[in-house]
Amino acid sequence: MSTTEELMGPGRPELHLEEMVLNMGPQHPSTHGVLRLVLHLDGELVISVEPVLGYLHRGFEKLAESRTYLQYMAMISRLDYLSGFFMEWSYVRSVEALMGVRAPKRAEYIRVIIGELNRIISHHVAIGDFMLNLGAVTPFFWVFRDREDVYDLLEMVTGQRMMYNYMRVGGVRWDLPDEFEAGCRKFITEFPARIDEYEQLITDNEIFLSRTLGMGIIKPKEALDYGISGPNARAAGIDWDLRREVGYSVYPEFDFDVPLGEHGDCFDRYKCRIEEMRQSVRIIEQALDSICDGPVNLKLPPMIRPPAGDVYRAVETPRGEFGVYIVSNGGLRPWRLKLRDPTFSAISMIPKLTAGNKIADLVAIAGSLDLLMGGVDR
Amino acid sequence: MTAEPVRLRQPEALEIARELMGKLARDITISDWHLVIEVRPDDLPEAALRLRDDERLSCKYLSCIIGVDYVDWMEALYLLRSMDHSVPIRLRVRLDREKPEVPSVTYIWSGANWHEREAYDFFGIRFLGHPDLRRILTREDYDTHPMKKDAWPHRVRRTEWRWENIEKPKRLPGETDRRDRS
């Protein structure tokens, strides 16, 4: 046996110790789309991270200026393709506020039911992808098995599995089909047991705990400073949910809790999402019980011409506060349309969260933030 | 745990903002359920600091920064919110369109960094004192700021894209065109 000195001594190749620059992405399975992270590494240790955006930039805001209000409906659900319903919801809320109209009550109930179903499948992907990032493949298939049940319901209502284009200014496109209620009730009675299954598989898993506990801690003050919202902020203990604080649509009628974390680490963010799925089930149940009959949309002309003015309306999406700011000059098309996406703020925090950690932990932190580039790059 | 949220009503918030801003604000109004405060570009950091550090309004959360091109002038709009009081605030800064410049608020809210880069990218608004003012969504060598109203003078004329003017694809025998039927 030779000693280390002999192996690395004179005459042997030198060991180069230098900072290494590594591009993670834009095509990397654990960056959730086309996010590129420029990593400066010291071995396994991350010195600094610089996210590079724009690989999915489609000019959503500019395109809005050349489309009528109804034409833009078909685009907006493509923005954040996992929770397209919330994008539509936020947009129609803004246009309705501009026009000073309110959707009929039945339409609001339908929006809440479909929206909460959409929240469930979005959290499915968040949890499944997070576990995939950590190397656990099974949960990914489990959540995708259960997503299919929701997809069937959404397809029954909207005719599409992902890009719904179901909302309209002043209501929804058409009423719920007759079979929907039975199917939805069947799903919400079965689903809580499925959540327990996920928890049995994931929550007490020792590997999962050792990878996530105390990892990527967001303090409440930092979360506010960076404009983080949604489950990421609530995991840090910020008691803020637009559904409750603003009370838009018919949410004030429902009884639900806002799950909070204590430490703001990866585990808390995962746990918040699991609890939010349970709360979504509660909301859907109450909405199905109290839904009223009546028309589902207002009779508005196809060429909407809102009065001049500006509005900002936001909804609580699975990722946080998504808002639409519209400036109208009284014409057929918006003068300016701005989309405020929660993931944009969350990604801007990655350099702060990951510096000083290992690469494998960077993947865990990025997964726990539930990144989706569709909304970020717009 | 935080204390029970204190709900300020808008008239109260308006009074507090008037008292807090003093001569800094050019105009304070309530519009679209928001408290809209208009300030001059030079006064922006001072106004932002006062709004953030005041205990009653405590705008610790910057939702986003919006640039708007009104052709005659440009505007930067800061959407602020307090997590305790639930009064959304818009801080409005009117800019010279030929030379849009405004002091950066990155040192007040860290999240402003990327929002300012975005407004620079889309509108060419220069945020003075920003640590790293580069394009963020469009490519680095893009020669224009695309959201300005005069950025694309060569607009496609929409009339050219009518169905009648497009060369129709060849059809297989027995296949009918969906549009012909209707």
Image (cartoon, rainbow, N blue to C red):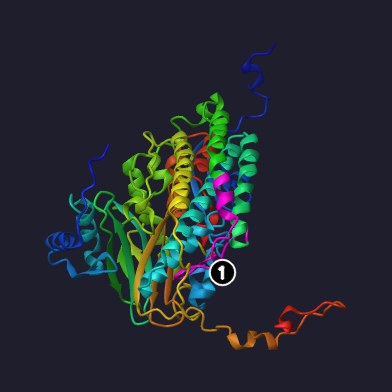
* Whether residue B128 is situated above or below residue A258 in the rendered picture: below
Tell me if residue B121 can be seen: no
Q: Is-magenta flag for residue A167?
A: yes
Q: Which quarter of the rendering shows the N terminus of chain A?
A: top right
Residue A279 drawn at (x, y percent): 44, 43
- Drawn side of residue A11 relative to residue B40, left or right: right
Tell whether B104 sits left or right of A41: left
Instruction: State the image coordinates of residue A353 (x, y, percent, origin top left).
Output: 44, 40
Residue A26 percent across, percent down from the top left:
60, 52
Q: A261 or A37, which is in the foreground?
A: A261
Q: For the point 47% across and 68% down, which residue is it?
A: A295
Farthest-out residue, top: A1
Residue lying furthest right in this view? B173
Q: Secondary structure at mark 1?
A: helix
User: What's the residue type where badge 1 is placed?
Assistant: Ala
Task: Tell me if A290 is positioned left or right of B46 in this view.
Answer: right
From this view, report whether residue A201 is shown above or below residue A332: above
Question: Residue beneath label 1, please?
Answer: A74
Q: Position of residue B179 (x, y in %)?
A: 71, 81
Question: Badge 1, how many Cα within 10 Å: few under 14, some, many 20+?
Answer: some
- Residue at 49% over, 73% down: A64
Question: Which residue occupies the foreground of this view, B90 or B100?
Answer: B90
- Residue B165 colored in magenta in the image: no
Which stretch appears magenta?
A160-186
